């Protein structure tokens, strides 16, 4: 199963798999700037999608630190636009 089937959740810095289970951030590899998110083996054990997803006890999804940072920034900008309104947010960003 391709990583694109997993949905990044910037508010919790985690992924959700197609079966609705959460993959939590487990480690950052400094050498290649990758971030690893991992499910719990107990969540995968009896999952009907496991044969298409992974042969390992649990699934690991990897993303770049840059990619995750951009997703979090985009999420925060959307939240600010919802709170302030788009025009006010645009005006505030123009003064920065």
Image (tube, rainbow, N blue to C red):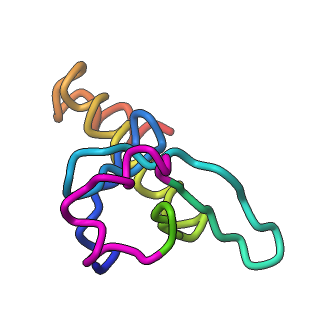
In this view, which residue lies farthest toward the right? 31
Looking at this rendering, what residue extends furthest in the front direction? 46
Residue 31 placement (x, y as % from top left): 82, 76
Residue 11, percent from left and from top? 39, 34
Measured as percent of width and height from the top left, residue 77 is found at: 34, 40
83 is within the stretch colored magenta: no
Measured along the vertical axis of the image, is residue 41 above or below residue 29?
Answer: above
**Looking at the image, how many numbered discs can be counted on the residues?**
0
Q: Where in the figure is residue 68, as x and y percent of width and height?
A: 50, 58
Q: In front: 15, or 41?
A: 41
Quadrant of the rendered image containing residue 81: top left
Could you tell me which residue is drawn at 18 percent across and 26 percent down?
A: 82
Left or right, residue 4 beside residue 62: left
* Residue under the image location 71 percent in, 71 percent down: 33
Which of the image's four quarters has the N terminus? bottom left
Does the stretch in magenta take in 42?
yes
Q: Look at the image and give the residue range highlighted in magenta.
A: 39-55
Q: Nearer the viewer, residue 76 or 89?
A: 76
| Residue at position x 47%, y 51% in the image | 39
- Residue drawn at x 58%, y 48% is 25
Residue found farthest to the top: 83
């Amino acid at each position: 199963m391709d990583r694109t089937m997993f949905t990044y959740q910037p508010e919790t810095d985690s992924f959700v798999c197609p079966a609705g289970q959460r993959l939590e951030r487990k480690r950052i590899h400094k050498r290649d700037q990758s971030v690893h998110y991992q499910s719990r083996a107990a969540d995968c054990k009896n999952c009907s999608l496991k044969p298409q997803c992974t042969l390992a006890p649990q699934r690991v999804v990897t993303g770049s630190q840059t990619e995750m940072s951009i997703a979090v920034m985009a999420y925060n900008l959307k939240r600010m636009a919802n709170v302030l309104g788009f025009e006010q947010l645009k005006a505030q960003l123009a003064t920065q």
